[in-house]
Amino acid sequence: MEKDFLWGAALSNVQAEGGYLEDGKGLNVYDTLVVTPEKGIAPMFCDTAVATDHYHHYKEDIDLMAEMGFKAYRFSVVWSRIHPMGDDEKPNEKGLAYYEDMVDYLLEKGIEPVVSLVHFDMPDHLLREYNGFLNKKVIDFYAQHVESVVERLKGKVKYWITYNEINLAPYQSDLVAGAYRPENMSQNEMFAQLTINTEIAHARAVEVIKRVDPQAKVGGMIGHAPFYPLTCKSEDILAADFKNKMHNYLPYDIMTSGTLPPYFINFMQKRNIHIDLSDTEKQVILESSRKLDYLAFSYYRSHVQSSFDDIKDPIALEDAILFDQRGLKNPNYKANEWGWQIDSEGLRYSLIDFYHRYQKPLFIVENGIGIDEKMVDGKIYDDERISYYQQHITSLKAAVEHDGVHLMGYLAWSPIDFLSSHKEIRKRYGFVYVNRDFDDLLDLKRYPKKSFYWYQKVIQTNGEDLENNIDY
Ligand code: BG6
């Protein structure tokens, strides 16, 4: 791997910070939304008031990242800490100061900050009063938020990510885009308009970042999971192709070309969907595509897609594929306790696919496994996590060293335990265990897991030594 390869990990602050309404923070969608459990999982939700108390432990947590040897660390600036209501005229000084301190501390430790500007943290008021990104005014508020943050951190933050998992906005619209589907809007219309509005938001963020800090690098980000055809029947191949375009490629296609791809225009025409997109907005999207530096994505698993034999109408068939909830399983892969199938070669496949399709530097900004862990005598033997990372790092190395992919860095998910996107502490991802239970905060003490020392060695050897021979 190149010497300047960005090894590290990433965190979503809204899932870790707590510090609920401290220092002027407002409620955000992650705080207020009632979550539905993951399929087949009994709910054990935590409230977000304390989470894993990263708000008060951030220096200690960064010290642990430095001990692991991180070159880079991705975190998110919680929108409702900067603009508590979202439509506030001025940013909250204490919020800005908090993240500036965090950035300064990272730089002091020699860790490159990679900052996400929206990650499940839209101010709740923007959902209730404006219906989130379905309302164009919210795009203006977002651009203002971005400007406040970039103005404050310019010259210190080199890498920005405009929007976490932008492609999930139409599927989890409340959490990802702060929006509910209005009664008079079809699912397809919502899909199309929210795709466009979030792309405008992304483009506006690119414009702000490059204007305020021309030296900074900016990337768009998707939550990626490739869809494989269930069988080699051409119907299934077509179904997977349609799904991959609409689910994975669409935002990247718009961000990189600056125009709407023909398959998306066709999708709208066939359904008589007329989106609200002005010439000025088209221009903003086009100009942002020329300024985009890299493409970032998260990768946890792959999926399987098939056609539906009983649906004959081609539009109804596509709609069924687009919103398919069957969760088909791939017979070749094992899954974690949450049914997420582990497919490390899917990461190599995705890297090759994206690099050849877009020819832009790529950045893996999330990859990891959620495990229900118990601490025994202060130790957590997470060999399952080590094995997951061994396989995925082997796969990305092949993509770089054999397939010639330009990969900027690898950020594991995650440095410390936090609440999952479904507000569960049970589903732990960290290299560091945080001592709390779902209904008892205990002492919130930090304990390095076995994987902590393993990843430290991986970084020290620039990805050469992946052996699990840690004396823990
Ligand atoms: C990504 C998100 O979707 O996946 C993270 O960006 C999230 O915020 C991660 O935590 C893992 O998903 P989950 O549901 O297990 O937390």
Image: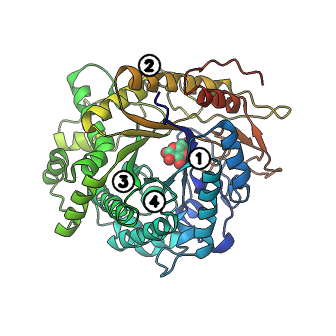
Q: First in sequence: mark 4 or mark 2?
A: 4
Q: What's the residue type where badge 3 is placed?
A: Pro
Distance Cα–Cα, label 3 vs label 1: 34 Å
For the question of whether residue 160 can be seen, the reply is yes
Which label was assigned to residue 111?
A: 1
Looking at this view, is 70 or 245 the one in front?
A: 70
Seen at 36% across and 45% down, the residue is: 294
In the displayed orientation, state which residue is furthest to the right: 377
Residue 333 x/y as whole percent: 48, 21
Q: First in sequence: mark 1 or mark 2?
A: 1
Answer whether labels 4 and 2 touch (C-beta < 8 Å). no
Seen at 70% across and 39% down, the residue is: 67
Answer whether labels 3 and 1 touch (C-beta < 8 Å). no
Residue 54 x/y as whole percent: 69, 54
Judging by the rendered image, the residue that carries numbered circle 3 is: 170
Judging by the rendered image, the residue that carries numbered circle 4 is: 174
Distance Cα–Cα, label 3 vs label 2: 29 Å
Distance Cα–Cα, label 4 vs label 3: 9 Å
